[in-house]
Amino acid sequence: MATTIEILNGISQIMANSHDGATDDKGEGLDIGLTREEGAPLTDKRVMDGFSVKMHGGNQLCVYYHTEMPIKHVHASDFESEMKEKLSKVKSFLQKEFKKVTGNALSLTSEGDAKVNVEYISRIRSSIRAYQTYSVKGLKPAETSEYKIDAAVKDWLSLKSDKKPKNVTR
């Protein structure tokens, strides 16, 4: 079982190695499952898509996927399932790379459904942001304890007085 800092450092290293054009140990391009990896980059129109991750609440990893596509693709019947498939490909990439980087397995359990937000850019294009929250096994949820105030701050707050200054005439 990996410690919290090892899990966070492993995820950070994966994200550092997964930029557009990144290669593996053999010099071959990484296969994440994104649309930008399909086709020839010199002759095909480049597709703008990518992913990122954020930690929420101590034990939740939120995976974000962003892309731009024509509006006619958004109205297709399988659009939402396609976005969920992209998120699952990113999840499996994270788990596979985590195993390579740290030697430990990364257990991610989905919490709720994937959310897909579509924003209008023009009459032709739209911006899509999809995200899914996963619970990371091995990380403890953030404790909801009362905010602890330093003794010096408590002493300073106790100096408050109800006396008014001499120049206040209200």
Image: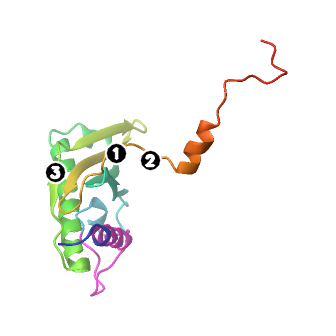
Residue 29's place in the image compared with 146, above or below, is: below
The circle drawn on residue 148 is 2
The Cα atoms of the two marked residues, 1 and 3, are separated by 26 Å
The region drawn magenta spans 7-31
Mainly helix, strand or loop, the magenta region?
A: loop
Labelled pair 1, 2 in contact (Cβ < 8 Å): yes
**In this picture, is 91 found above or below 116?**
below
Instruction: State the residue position of label 1.
Output: 145
Where residue 136 sits in the image (x, y, percent)?
A: 21, 58
Q: Which residue position holds label 3?
A: 110
Q: Give the residue drawn at x 24%, y 41%.
A: 115
| Callouts 1 and 3 close, C-beta under 8 Å | no
Quadrant placement of the N terminus: bottom left
Point out the tag, 1 or 3, that comes first from the N-terminus. 3
Residue at the extreme bottom:
26
Q: Which residue is drawn at the image coordinates 26% and 55% (left, top)?
A: 59
User: Residue 58, image x and y in percent?
Assistant: 30, 54
Q: Magenta stretch: residue 127 in it?
A: no
Q: Earlier in the sequence, mark 2 or mark 3?
A: 3
- Crowding near pointer 3: few (<14 within 10 Å), some, many (20+)? some
Q: Nearer the viewer, residue 157 or 99?
A: 157
Amino acid at circle 3: Ser
